[in-house]
Amino acid sequence: MYKMKYPNLFKPLKVGDVTLRNRIISAPQGFLHLDAESLPTQAAAAFYEEKARGGAAVVTIGEGYVDTVHGIDIPKGIHLDTDDCIGGLSLLADAVNKHGAVASMELQHAGMYASESYVNGNQIYAPVERMGEGTKAGARLHGVLIPEMPEEVILDTIEKFAQAALRCKQAGFGMVLVHGGHGWLLNQMMSPVINTRTDKWGGSLENRMRMPIAVCDRIREVCGRNFLIDFRFSAADVCNPGGYTPEDGIEMAKMIDGHVDFIHCSVGNHEVEESFVVVHPSMFLEDACNLKYAKEVKKHVKTPVVAVGAFSDPQMMEDTLAEGAVDAIAMARGLIADPDFPLKARQGKDEDINRCLRCYQCFSGLLDTRQFCCAINPVIGRELENKFDTTGYDRKKVLVAGGGIGGMQAALEAAKRRHEVILVEKTGRLGGALLCEEKVSFKKNLDLYLAAQARRVMEHPGIEVRLNTAATKELAEEITPDAIIAALGARPVIPSFLPGYDRPNVAGAEEVYYDLAKAGQKVVILGGGLVGCELGIHLALNGRRVTILEMASAPNFSGNMLHGEAVTAQIDIHGIRLMTETEAVEIKDDGVAASGPDGKVFVEADTVIYAVGQKSLENEVEELRFCAPEFYSIGDCSMPANIAKATKEGYYAARDIGRI
């Protein structure tokens, strides 16, 4: 008889007449793949279908706006305030329901952060009159006087929530998530800092909870008992001076208890900059860092409690549920990195799970390009094109040169497509340059991913791996491949232009990652990019006093603004000295002579570490370019970039082989 490894994680949860097949909920994610009318497309359906096929019990569609006149903060979100949305919603519901999951829709209203409504020329409202402020959704509202929401608008908004839920039910959804957290309208009404009204809609806790409870009660009245309501709220207003405490959050939960089917415990406010990296935990925070709030709420309510935030280990999830700490666990980025997480955990294939790196690549993609991407999942956001993909191309002999992130991804995809694959790696291990970070505490999921990919490559019967083998022209002539994928990586730039660069107290970032003993107690890092800043944090965590010199006016986080916020917070927390607009002039035995905004300065150091960029291996790539009919150059060897670029390029290069 099959022995279930995680019986509590996969124990069904019965709520009313609805039974969830397990305790894993796919949490809402920012939207993509909408048409010009803000309605879902087939590509959107394919995105959410993958999560249902992957085994989640509930799949929650994000960014559903109940009031597109007064309540939207971004250009793209599903408009739920007219019946025009029902056709598109049914497309999503069917994609989820047919795989045995329950389709849920997030109901949202931005309130005083409804910047898109304001830009469109519409009136927006706050709980009380206030000047606009905010860092993200509210950034366009600085200095705008936002009036108090009149009672008739409050009542109308309550009805809009209910009618939006009814449209979802008509379309085939079995559930809605009422968003009462993260700084949106209902959370604004719950906040003692924001909602200082003197009428029945504000002031006391009872009055501040009146609108959220009224919304949930009206949805229940309109949609019926067996249409489930998931109420997400911030169980603590972390990083917000004067905001409510975890004890206040417990009282809020006690008041909503009995009015909903799930109490979904998140934390924080998007618009408080320091809070964002706690709402969506960064790699620097411990796993399940917000679970403690949900556990406390669970002690005081009868309604099933959902925890969310930085869950990636099925054993931890099993233990949490086994002890009765919560009733279900929601995952967002974890199911972006690996939509098949539930299926793999159910089958005991933990080592095959690609755990979220918490690098914010997905968030940055949405903010910068309005497209999802993931550092380790090249298919995310492109599910439709892959759904109808064919592997029927001619079988080829493929030489993959380089065993880093991109090379391993390329080899696995090429082998999946039945090509004969030979992967050569000049060192004795697969993993590439990122292996140097395997002992970094906040990169543990990256370490797990590299190890898992290496194991998959080494064990794949269709891949021949040759370690300690350089990819040369002579080797290619011996193998005679039909296609070459050059994934050779890049080498660190050595600042040979800088006097003293070759002193014995100077080392490269990669060297220090491999051997921490090379770093003295006082360290200066040249370069304030991600490599330098993350290394600085690693050194500070290991007891070093760190100064970072950066020539530009601010650190360069390679376009990943949200990870940059997390890094900046860690720099402050660990007392790292960051000197911007400061250029190293000479390295000496006892430190670095530099030139900054206030003139010449000398920074004492036992060790100077350079992290001033990477240079593509152009000569090595060119040596291979004409050694096969098909040639692809991917990852850092074409242009130094990041994990996401290497992963995606490796995947698509392998897909393209043999088309002609």
Image: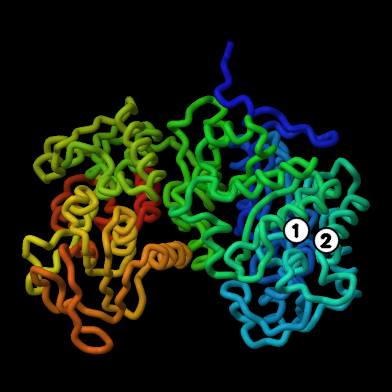
Question: Would you say residue 63 is visible in this rendering?
Answer: yes
The residue drawn where x is 42% and y is 64% is 573
Question: Would you say residue 388 is visible in this rendering?
Answer: no
The residue drawn where x is 78% and y is 75% is 196
| Residue underneath mark 2 | 161
Q: Earlier in the sequence, mark 1 or mark 2?
A: 1
| Residue underneath mark 1 | 107
- Would residue 121 appear left or right of 159 to someone viewing this image? left
Q: Which mark is residue 430?
A: none
Question: Tag 2, which secondary structure?
Answer: helix
> How far is disc 1 from disc 2 in space, using C-alphas?
7 Å
Quadrant for the C terminus in the image = top left
Question: What colouring style does the render use?
Answer: rainbow
- Would residue 641 appear left or right of 235 to someone viewing this image? left
586 lies above or below 360: below
The residue drawn where x is 71% and y is 29% is 12
Amino acid identity at mark 1: Leu
Task: Pinpoint residue 129: horizontal percent, then vertical percent.
Answer: 76, 83
Task: Pinpoint residue 464: horizontal percent, then vertical percent.
Answer: 25, 30
**Total numbered labels placed on residues in the image:** 2
Instruction: Check if mark 1's residue and mark 2's residue have beta carbons within 8 Å.
Output: yes
- Would residue 72 appear left or right of 570 to someone viewing this image? right
Task: Pinpoint residue 599: horizontal percent, then vertical percent.
Answer: 22, 89
The residue drawn where x is 12% and y is 62% is 506
467 lies above or below 545: above
Quadrant for the N terminus in the image = top right
Q: Quick one: 570 or 361, which is closer to the camera? A: 570
Furthest toward the right, the residue is 221
- Would residue 110 appear left or right of 317 to someone viewing this image? right
Question: Tag 1, which secondary structure?
Answer: strand
Amino acid identity at mark 2: Phe
Task: Pinpoint residue 287: horizontal percent, then vertical percent.
Answer: 50, 45
